[in-house]
Amino acid sequence: MQEAIEKADTLIEAMGWIRRFRDSITVIKLGGSVMEDADALRHLLVDIVFMETVGMRPIVVHGGGAAISRAMAEAKLEPNFIQGRRYTDEATLDIVRRVLAGDVNEMIAQRIEEFGGRAMPLNPNGETDNNVLFGEKLALAADDGSQIDLGFVGQVTRVDRDTLDNLCYAGQVPVIPSVCKTEDGQLLNVNADTAAMAVAQAMGAEKLVFLSDVNGVRLNKDDPESLIHTLTADSAVELIQRGVIESGMIPKVEACLETLSKGVQKIHIIDGRLRHSLLLEIYTNRGIGTEIVTEI
C-alpha cells in the first residue's frame, strides 16, 4: 500500500508540470553516447512517447557520428575533423545521406512507433523527400584570417515551421536528422547541436534539451554532486570568466545563452544515460540536470 501511495504522490507532483507544459514545444537533441546505448535510447524514446501522450509536443533532432564513423571504416575512408567539424567530401556525404539521414532517422521513428507513439521521419532521401532544414555552406576562419574549406558542411538558415507545426498538432513526433539542403537542393552535413538550436529558435520552443553523458553543469567538473540545478544567463557568463565552466562545456553553454537570447524559454543539459532522465527533469520539482534560464 505504501508503494502505491508513493506512486500516487509522484503522479500528483507531475500533474502541475503536465498542465503547465501542455501544447508546448520541446526540442530534444539526441546524439553521442546516448545513441550507442540501446537501453538508454529505449528509455528516452519511451519518455518522448509519454510526453506526447500527456499533451506536450516533442520534436527530435538527432546526430549519428558514431554510425557514420563505422560506415566510413567499412568503406576504408579516413575521417578528418577540422575545428571539431567532420570534413565532408562527396564520399562522406553519401554515407551521411544513407546512414544518418536514412538508416538512423528511420530507426528512431520506427522505435517511437513500436513504443506506442506516432512519428514522422523527416529526411531528404528518395521520392518522399520531406526535408525541413535549409541552409548554406559553413565557412570557418583560420588563425590567419583565411577561410577553411569543410566540404559539404552547412549551417541552418531556415526551418520549415509550417510542416513541423502541422505534425505536432496532429500528434506526431517529428524526427529530424542533422542535415540541411541549400535552396538549390545540395545536401549539407550539419552539427546536431546547432541544428537543434535552429529548430528550437524557429519554433519558439518552451524547452531545448541536450542529452549529454554528464549530469549537467558542475561547480567542480569532476564531482557529480556539485551539479548546478538552475543557472541564469548572467551566472553562466560569470562562471565561464572564473574558469569554473571550462573546456568542452564552454561552447555548449555559450550556445545555450545565444539560444536563450532568441526566445527559447529554458535549456536543459541532462545525463541521457540515466533511466527516464527526460521525465525526471521535466515532470519533477527539482529535476536531475541543469536548467539554464535568462533570469529567475
Image: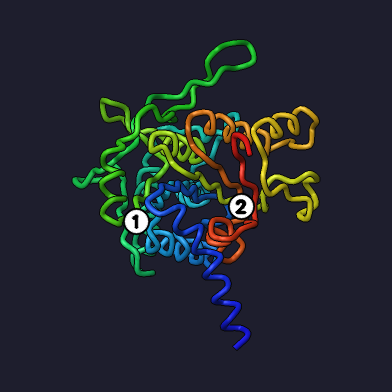
Location of residue 151 in the rendering, given as x and y in whole percent from the top left corner? 44, 27
Dot 2 crowding, Cα within 10 Å, few <14, some 14–19, many 20+: many
Is 217 above or below relative to 84? Answer: below
Q: Is residue 41 left or right of residue 219?
A: left
Q: Which residue is mark 1?
A: 106
Residue plotted at (60% across, 17% down)? 142
Q: Is residue 106 left or right of residue 261?
A: left
Three-letter code, disc 1? Glu
Residue at 55 percent of width and 35 percent of height: 80
Residue 105 lies, with reference to residue 87, above or below; the image says: below
Foreground: 250 or 144? Answer: 250
Q: How far apart, in angstroms, are the residues tagged by discs 2 and 1?
A: 25 Å
Q: Residues within 10 Å of mark 1 (few under 14, many from 20)?
A: many
Residue 141, quarter of picture: top right
Q: How many marks?
A: 2
Residue receiving disc 2: 270
In primary-sequence order, the first of circles 2 and 1 is 1
Q: Which image quarter is the C terminus in?
A: top right
Residue 162 badge: none
Type of the residue with mark 2: Ile
Residue 157 screen position, x and y as percent: 38, 27
Q: Quadrant of residue 258?
A: top right
Residue at 49%, 45% (x, y): give it: 207
Asked if labels 1 and 2 touch by Cβ distance under 8 angstroms, the answer is no
Return the residue nearer the eye: 176 or 80: 176
Residue 208: in sight, yes or no? yes
Coloring scheme used: rainbow
> Dot 1 lies on which element?
helix
